[in-house]
Amino acid sequence: MPDRAVAVFEIKRYMVIWRQIEEREFDGTLARIRGLVRCNGVGASDHENYRLDVYFLADDSAVPDPLVDIDNRSGAIFMPISDISAFVDILRNEKPIYGHLRGDNPQWTSVTTGNEPVGTGDEDHRFGES
């Protein structure tokens, strides 16, 4: 695989995992994990498989820095457990959804929607309008 600093992939599948509590160390930071959303997809430019794990942390948890491994097509970001419902809602209700692995600026690793026209919503599609 060529040396790249950024990879974009379309998220095709996700899995939600709830935990009572799991303590795991990420680069020297002990995180207290309550949930995990694993996002899998296909590279926009290379059609390879990619994964982004979004860890949802307990309120009293330290927050690790984002992790990106472009060579292995994977990454991890960390969010508060209070954000899990909104995050899963976006995955369920928007399309397309993209994962952005940023080896050049790991703090910019993200999940984004496609570029939508202003004012569109679920109600606009009820009556088969285009």
Image: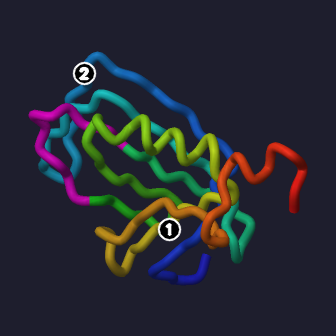
Q: Which residue matches tag 2?
A: 21
How far from the left and from the top, in percent, is residue 68? 39, 63
- Measuring 43% from the left and 42% from the top, which residue is drawn there? 86
How far from the left and from the top, in percent, is residue 80? 25, 42
- Measuring 71% from the left and 47% from the top, which residue is drawn there? 123
Q: Is residue 59 magenta?
A: yes
- Above or below, 59 against 119 in this view is above
User: Camera-side residue: 129 or 110?
Assistant: 129
Q: Name the image quarter holding residue 60.
A: top left
Judge left or right: residue 23 versus residue 125: left
Q: Main secondary structure of the magenta part?
A: loop
Sooner in the amino-acid sequence: mark 2 or mark 1? 2
Disc number at residue 100? Answer: 1
Look at the numbered disc 1 and give the secondary structure of its residue: strand
Q: Name the image quarter holding residue 22.
A: top left
- Measuring 36% from the left and 80% from the top, which residue is drawn there? 104
- Measuring 90% from the left and 50% from the top, which residue is drawn there? 128
User: Camera-side residue: 71 or 67?
Assistant: 67
Check the picture and name the quadrant holding the N terminus: bottom right
The magenta span reads 55-65
User: Camera-side residue: 4 or 19?
Assistant: 19
Judge left or right: residue 62 versus residue 112: left
Instruction: For residue 117, say whether it is visible.
Output: yes
Classed neighbour count for the residue bearing mark 1: other residues with Cα under 10 Å, few (<14), some (14–19), many (≥20): many
**What amino acid is labelled 1 in the image?**
His
Look at the numbered disc 2 and give the secondary structure of its residue: strand
How far from the left and from the top, in percent, is residue 37? 47, 38
**What amino acid is labelled 2 in the image?**
Ile
Instruction: For residue 49, say whether it is visible.
Output: no
Q: Is residue 53 magenta?
A: no
Q: Name the image quarter holding residue 93.
A: top right
